[in-house]
Amino acid sequence: MPLVEKEIYQFDRFLLDPAERILSCDGAPLSLTPKAFDILICLVRNQGHIVTKDELLRQVWPDTFVEEINLAVNVSAIRKALGDSVQECRFVATVPGRGYRFVAEVRHPPNQNGNEKPPEIAQDCGAREVSSEFGNTPVVAAFRRRRLRLVIPAGLVLLIGALLASYSWRPEKATKASTPGEASIAVLPFADLSQRQDHQYFTDGLAEELINDLSRVSGLKVVARSSAFEFRDRNEDLRSVGRKLGVSHVLEGSVRKERDRFRITVELTNTESGFQIWSQTYDHKINDIFAVQDEIAEAVSNALQIKLLGANGSSIPPTARRTNPEAYQAYLQGRYFQGRSESKEDLEKALAFANRAINLDSYYAPAWVLRSTTYNLMAGFGLIDNQEGMRRARENVQHAIALDPVLASAYLALGDIQLSYDWDWSGAESSGRKAVELEPGSADVLRYQSLLAEALGHLHEAIESQRKAILIDPLLARSYTSLGAQLYETGNYEDARAAFHRALELNPQKEHDHALQGEVLLAQGRHEQALSETELEPSKFWRQVNEALVYNALNRREDSDAALSAVIATDENGAAFEIAEVYAARGEIDKAFAWLDRAYRQRDGGLTYVKVDPLLKNLRQDPRYVALLARMHLSV
């Protein structure tokens, strides 16, 4: 009875066993994704012959429409596993415009009869799926049409940027693709598919870091986190998401964490056609998270043979910042609590997790930035002494920059201190320039540029930067508030009111916007309407400040005094600038300057905009106003 020949291939130091799904080198098994393994089988079975791209796509993805980029990425993974490269081509050679050829000599180990008999080449490549230890559950389906700070695999950033900027469509499915200048993407919040669904800090961090890293790609519009995350659990059609966010592509994903392993699944969709362009799943141990970055980065850069460049023309590093998994998870939890609310409890938790991350890895710069920004917030909200809090914030961020001189968030954190506390304008401009160089497409960077320009009196530049930030982050209410304030400062009252109205449409409970609307109405001489608008203000503090202004305009001096006295009684240590504004608007010049002096001694952040504040117009001809600007190193 003839023996059944087992299909095994040997080349160089490698052994390929299609039946057992094993690729080994000198007896040690190597890791390949199922699709990469299937492609390798196809190429080895057809050793010396060209296997076209269409044939590989048809055999490996028989019932699924995918883009050629999936093929290129998997071929690159094969090359890496074999120690090959696109330059050497010792095993897999690219045939430009056609496909691939396996060029190494292939032998067949002797069978049980001692013969080296090659089995017949199959008519197809024998592609088939295998299950991972997570099982065969279709993870993508669980988050599809649901709503997408762990470091993202840097290679994933390269891949997505490359897909948007330069992918080619298969002819039979041709669709208009975005040009590099038109490339745009929104990263929706990743779904937490863990059993207890208690890893939102991890999944949000995954998406947020991806947003931050993609923002470093020059020419790529990346919608900011605050707008993209508005679609969490909205179950909205991705074409509608694309229209609302003004993007051509949407990335969504899911994360499942079980014991010491995680699975990340991502999908990239064209929002015009609704077709999926690319998808991939990554299964790894939690300790391997940073190794995944190198694996994907090298595979993508080799396969695409491209370089995605930042604004200064330098290559974007293919590896993300390293730390140990425990430190990184502590960092992510700190980021989560810092962003959740401005409460004392959440900020203290954020600080505790930042401290834990630093204790676990004192060289991890983002954790030092997290601690700096948390101290800044706590000082700003009066939870700790202002001077001591800002001293700690500055020391921590300066240490972060010393550890990682190319961390954009560190320069923004330092710039915020220089802008709102130190009034170090040249330092703030230098920090801003560095942040722009590192993350040119970041909405946070644009907002920073806008606020700095406003403080320096360059209002048209400020408005232009704020509008650019809104294009990237169209659903963030506070951007419209800032834009409205800047338009108000230029005397463009109707556009200012429209901006405040849009902020309240996005967040009807938002504080300060009704009060600002009231200020604009006062400037227009519409005093009764200003009072009605002021009464709608949900913040007691801003409502009382505005009542002092409006009642004065209505010649209700006693009511104005009562409102101002209430502000002084409760907030004199944190609202010196606003108290000065009221006195200035009421024409009480000496009292206004007395409170401005107090604001200066207290390093009140409101003074940052002393040069453009419309409520201070009665002071501008006074020599004391010129002297105050000089003390703050501002030109007249």
Image: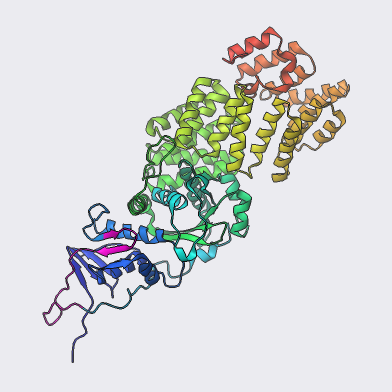
Judged from this view, the residue extending furthest toward the left is: 114
Identity of the residue drawn at 59% across and 45% down: 226
Q: Which residues are magenta?
A: 93-118
Res. 602 in view: yes
Give the side of residue 256 with respect to residue 404, left or right.
Answer: right
Residue at x 79% of width, y 15% of height: 587
Question: Quarter holding the N terminus?
Answer: bottom left
Magenta highlight: main SS: loop
* 187 drawn magenta: no
Q: Nearer the viewer, residue 270 or 82?
A: 270
Quarter residue 454 falls in = top right
In the figure, residue 136 lies in which quadrant?
bottom left
Locate the C terminus and report the quarter of the image it occupies. top right
Measuring from the top left, give residue 427's x and y in whole percent: 49, 22
At which x and y percent is residue 387? 55, 23
Q: Determine which quarter of the picture holds residue 508.
A: top right
The image position of residue 140, as x and y in percent, is 50, 64
In the image, 521 versus 289, the foreground residue is 521
In the displayed structure image, the side of residue 388 where residue 505 appears, left or right: right
